[in-house]
C-alpha cells in the first residue's frame, strides 16, 4: 500500500518537473530550489499517534557554492490551498505548534527554519518532526499535511519551481476488520431517495481473499433492472465487469494477489463507463450502459456471495459522484466521515455488538437474498478481528 501512496503523488503532478542537478561546477550563475525525490513535490510521513513521525526536506543549490548561503524554509498554507484546488482534495494544514523543524545543529523551531549550505556543498537537510498526534485534534476522518516552501536566500535567486514540498501524513491505524464466518451475499436495499438515475458514482471496498480460485467469486454488484452490474474476481484474470454480456474483454486481465489487502474501486462516470482501480492503480475502463437503482422491489447493492467463507472485509463505501484518482488513493484505508453529503453508503465493518453489521448513512436496509426472495441462500454471518494495523499489505495483527 505504501508504494501507492507514492503513486498518488506522481499522478497528481502539482509541481512542474525540474531537471535535478548534479551539484558539480561553480560560479555566480547559481540558484536555490527545493530538492524533491519526485516531480510532484509530495512526500509521505508515516505517523503513529504516540510515537509521532518524521520526514526530511532538502533545500539545494544548482551548483556548489564557494561561500556560506543561508536558506529559509517556512510553512506555506497557500501552497496547500492551491494543491487542494488542483486535486479536489481537502487536506488540512497541521498546526505549527504540533511539529518542529530540526536543523543539523539540533536546533528546533516552529513554523520556520534557517539552514546554512557551507562552502564546497550544494544542499542541506531539515528534519520535520512530529512528537505525537492528538487524535481528538486530528481525527482519522480528515487528512492532514505540512506544506513547506523555500522563502529566502542570503545569496542567489530562488527558482520558481520546484521551491516547495508537501508532507502528507500517512496515519498508522489499529482497528478491527470483518471476516465472513459464513459466506453469503450482503444485500443492501436503498431508500426511495436513491432510486433514481445517477450518472456518476463510486463504490470502494477493501478485501483480503485467502483464496481466489472460484469461477464465481464477486466483489460488489448492483441488481436493479436498469443496466445491471456484476463483478467477478480471479487471481490470474483480475476483475470482471459484466454489464449485459460476458466475454474475454470484460476482464481487466491484471493478476491479483491472494492473502493481501486489495482496495478495490469502481467509478461510474457520465452514465457510460466504469473504471476499475486496485490499490490506487487503474486496471481498465469499460464502456457501460447507465447503472443506477430502480424502483423494483428486489433492487439492491450486494457485497460478496457464497464463495466468501473466510474473506476479510473493511471500509465498504459508495459516493454519489465519480472520485478522482487522487481521491481514490487518499481514501484507501482511513475511516470516512459518515456525515459527508456525497457519501451515500458506508459500512466500516469494525466491531459491532453481537457481530452484527451496520450501515452508517441510514440510506439502506441490510438484508439477504433469502429475505428478498431472490434465491434460497443462507444469509452471511460476520465475525470481527481486533487490533489489525494499517497501512499494510498483509493481515498484521498487533500483539501476535
Image (cartoon, helix red, strand yellow):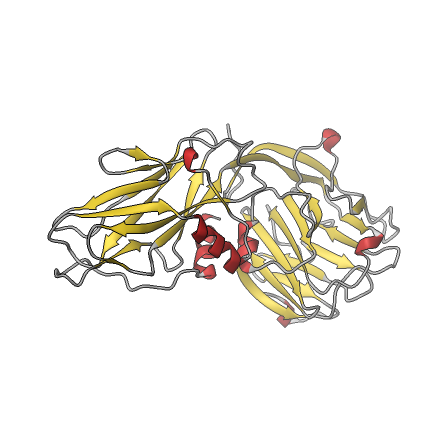
Disc count in the image? 0
Task: Locate residue 241, reporting x and y percent.
Answer: 67, 64
Q: Is residue 313 visible?
A: no
Relative vertical location of residue 283 with respect to residue 186 in this rendering, above or below: below
Task: Locate residue 280, reporting x and y percent.
Answer: 53, 56
Task: Locate residue 126, reporting x and y percent.
Answer: 29, 42
Answer with the quarter of the image where residue 273 lies.
bottom right
Q: Is residue 73 visible?
A: yes
Residue at image position (34%, 61%) is 161
Residue at image position (25%, 53%) is 60
Residue at image position (52%, 40%) is 390
Residue at image position (67%, 49%) is 317
Q: Would residue 160 appear left or right of 191 to someone viewing this image?
A: left
- Residue 70 or 329: which is nearer the viewer? 70
Relative vertical location of residue 9 with respect to residue 106 in this rendering, above or below: below
Task: Locate residue 373, reporting x and y percent.
Answer: 88, 51
Q: Would residue 145 appear left or right of 265 to someone viewing this image?
A: left
Relative vertical location of residue 180 with respect to residue 78 in this rendering, above or below: above
Relative vertical location of residue 308 with respect to residue 202 in this rendering, above or below: above
Q: Would residue 116 appear left or right of 306 to someone viewing this image?
A: left
- Residue 12 or 300: which is nearer the viewer? 12
- Residue 100 or 158: which is nearer the viewer? 158
Q: Would residue 64 appear left or right of 60 to someone viewing this image?
A: left
Amino acid at each position: 500500500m505504501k508504494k501507492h501512496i507514492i503513486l498518488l503523488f506522481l499522478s497528481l503532478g502539482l509541481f512542474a518537473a525540474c531537471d535535478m542537478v548534479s551539484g558539480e561546477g561553480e560560479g555566480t550563475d547559481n540558484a536555490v530550489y527545493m530538492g524533491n525525490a519526485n516531480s510532484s513535490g509530495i512526500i509521505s510521513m508515516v505517523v503513529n499517534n504516540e510515537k509521532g513521525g518524521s520526514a526530511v526536506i532538502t533545500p539545494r543549490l544548482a551548483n556548489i557554492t564557494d561561500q556560506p548561503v543561508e536558506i529559509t524554509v517556512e510553512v506555506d498554507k497557500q501552497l496547500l490551498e492551491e494543491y487542494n484546488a488542483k486535486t479536489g482534495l481537502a487536506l488540512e494544514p497541521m498546526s505549527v505548534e504540533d511539529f518542529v523543524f530540526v536543523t543539523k545543529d539540533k536546533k528546533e523551531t516552529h513554523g520556520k527554519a534557517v539552514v546554512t549550505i557551507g562552502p564546497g556543498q550544494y544542499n542541506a537537510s531539515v528534519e520535520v518532526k512530529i512528537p505525537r498526534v492528538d487524535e481528538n485534534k486530528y481525527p482519522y476522518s480528515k487528512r492532514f499535511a505540512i506544506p513547506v516552501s523555500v522563502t529566502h536566500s542570503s545569496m542567489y535567486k530562488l527558482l520558481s519551481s520546484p521551491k516547495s514540498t508537501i508532507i502528507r501524513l500517512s496515519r498508522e491505524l489499529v482497528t478491527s476488520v470483518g471476516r465472513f464466518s459464513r459466506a453469503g451475499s450482503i444485500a443492501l436495499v436503498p431508500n426511495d431517495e436513491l432510486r433514481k438515475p445517477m450518472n456518476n458514482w463510486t463504490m470502494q471496498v477493501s478485501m483480503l481473499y485467502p483464496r481466489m480460485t472460484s469461477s464465481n467469486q464477486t466483489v460488489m454488484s448492483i441488481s436493479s433492472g436498469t443496466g445491471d452490474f456484476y463483478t467477478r474476481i480471479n487471481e490470474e484474470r483480475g476483475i470482471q465487469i459484466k454489464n449485459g454480456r460476458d466475454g474475454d474483454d470484460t476482464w481487466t486481465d491484471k493478476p491479483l494477489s491472494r492473502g493481501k489487502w486489495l482496495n478495490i474501486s469502481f467509478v461510474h462516470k457520465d452514465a457510460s463507463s466504469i473504471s476499475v482501480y486496485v490499490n490506487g492503480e487503474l486496471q481498465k475502463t469499460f464502456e457501460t450502459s447507465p447503472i443506477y437503482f430502480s424502483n423494483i422491489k428486489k433492487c439492491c447493492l450486494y457485497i460478496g456471495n457464497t464463495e466468501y467463507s473466510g474473506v476479510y472485509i473493511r471500509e465498504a463505501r459508495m459516493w454519489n459522484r465519480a472520485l478522482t484518482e487522487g481521491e481514490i488513493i487518499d481514501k484507501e484505508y482511513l475511516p470516512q466521515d459518515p456525515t459527508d453529503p456525497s457519501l451515500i453508503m458506508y459500512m466500516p465493518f469494525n466491531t459491532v455488538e453481537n457481530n452484527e453489521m451496520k450501515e452508517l448513512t441510514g440510506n439502506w436496509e441490510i438484508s439477504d437474498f433469502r429475505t428478498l426472495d431472490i434465491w434460497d441462500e443462507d444469509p452471511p454471518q460476520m465475525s470481527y478481528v481486533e487490533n489489525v494495523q494499517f497501512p499494510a499489505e498483509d493481515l498484521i495483527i498487533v500483539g501476535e
